[in-house]
Amino acid sequence: MNRICELLGIKYPIIQGGMAWVATAELAAAVSNGGGLGLIAAGGAPAEVVREQIKKARTLTDKPFGVNVMLMNPNADEIMRVIIEEKPAVVATGAGNPGKYIAGLKEAGIKIMPVIASVAMAKRMEKAGADAVIAEGTEAGGHIGELTTMVLTPQVVDAVSIPVISAGGYADSRGTRAAFALGADGIQVGTRFICSTECLAHENYKNAVLKAKDRDAVVTGRSTGAPVRALKNKLTREYDRLEKEGASFEEIEALGVGGLRRAFEEGDVQTGSLMAGQSAAMVKAIEPCADIIQDYFKGVEF
Ligand code: TUI
């Protein structure tokens, strides 16, 4: 049996990316009901909102699901306390080192899968007791590392013995086959799930992903040390301008505040932050999560 399916008790070795704002209880439950592992994204939310989301997901699915904790969130400690009380099956983390939380999560019987962007971090997480790692390449959307999925995945596979989930750039069954060829045990998908029927993102955001072409998912914020990939628009052009002018870190960061909410809720495709990976160019339709999952595994043995 596939190691990720066994570890998580799921049918297909696919987990949904923890996209801030986008990954609600509704999306997570739809992915889990479709046979993958859905994740609620804590993003920048307060801890009590995360608790409500976990409770809501429980009303929508009887399958395992998880929570993604973005470690740059100043409420991360409190969110982890709520998670240990509510006991979702899995915690994934992003944008930092979850080391100090691992023992507490394991004690509560919660599986822990950190997103990592380097071999060194993968090894550290294995030593610290992680159940699996999610190796995310720079093709992914949102906050990213430097290495591509193609070179990061096999190096992480060689460096650790826990299961490896490969992320960044996976748009269809060709990618899934490639992930297994690289030695991965499963894939993580974010962008294509934005274009799911069950995703609550504004239709303008979904349509922007559908319309995206090969070079439209651009990176801003390299100069501030927190690079983010999103679809090119007025906001990303404004970032580029400020960075070129050598604006202060604070000025650049201020530009992005509220950007995800503007994209997700208001459908503001000009000043909103349309975080998406390079695979946006390969997303062709809005479909139910269960159909999307089936398409990733069409003709794929695992
Ligand atoms: O976390 C993500 N993607 C994200 S988080 C996010 S919210 C945000 N909004 C505005 C600005 C910045 C972030 C949007 N997208 N992916 C997982 C990921 N984690 N990618 C890279 C990493 C990572 C980076 C460094 C993981 C660990 C790490 O270690 C640093 C250390 O402590 O050594």
Image: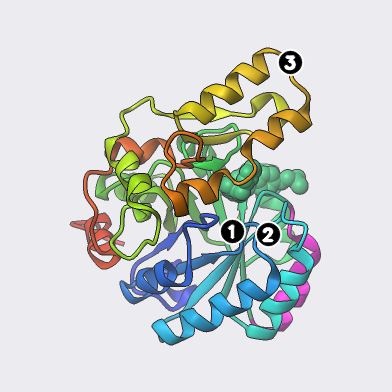
| Image quarter of residue 112 | bottom right
Q: Amino acid at mark 2?
A: Glu
Q: Earlier in the sequence, mark 2 or mark 1?
A: 2
Q: Amino acid at mark 3?
A: Gly
Check disc 1 and report its element: helix, strand or loop.
Answer: loop
Q: Which residues are magenta?
A: 97-109
Asked if labels 1 and 2 touch by Cβ distance under 8 angstroms, the answer is yes
Residue behind mark 2? 126
Q: Is residue 126 visible?
A: yes
Distance from disc 1 to disc 3, alpha carbons, whole Å, reads: 44 Å
* Rendering coords of residue 16 (x, y %): 44, 60
Residue behind mark 3? 246
Distance from disc 3 to disc 2, alpha carbons, whole Å, reads: 39 Å
* Rendering coords of residue 226 (x, y %): 68, 35
Q: Nearer the viewer, mark 1 or mark 3?
A: 3
Q: Earlier in the sequence, mark 3 or mark 2?
A: 2
Q: Is residue 292 magenta?
A: no
| Image quarter of residue 15 | bottom left
Q: Say if 65 sits above or below 266 in the image.
A: below
Q: Nearer the viewer, mark 3 or mark 2?
A: 3
Residue behind mark 1? 161
Give the quadrant of the N terminus.
bottom left
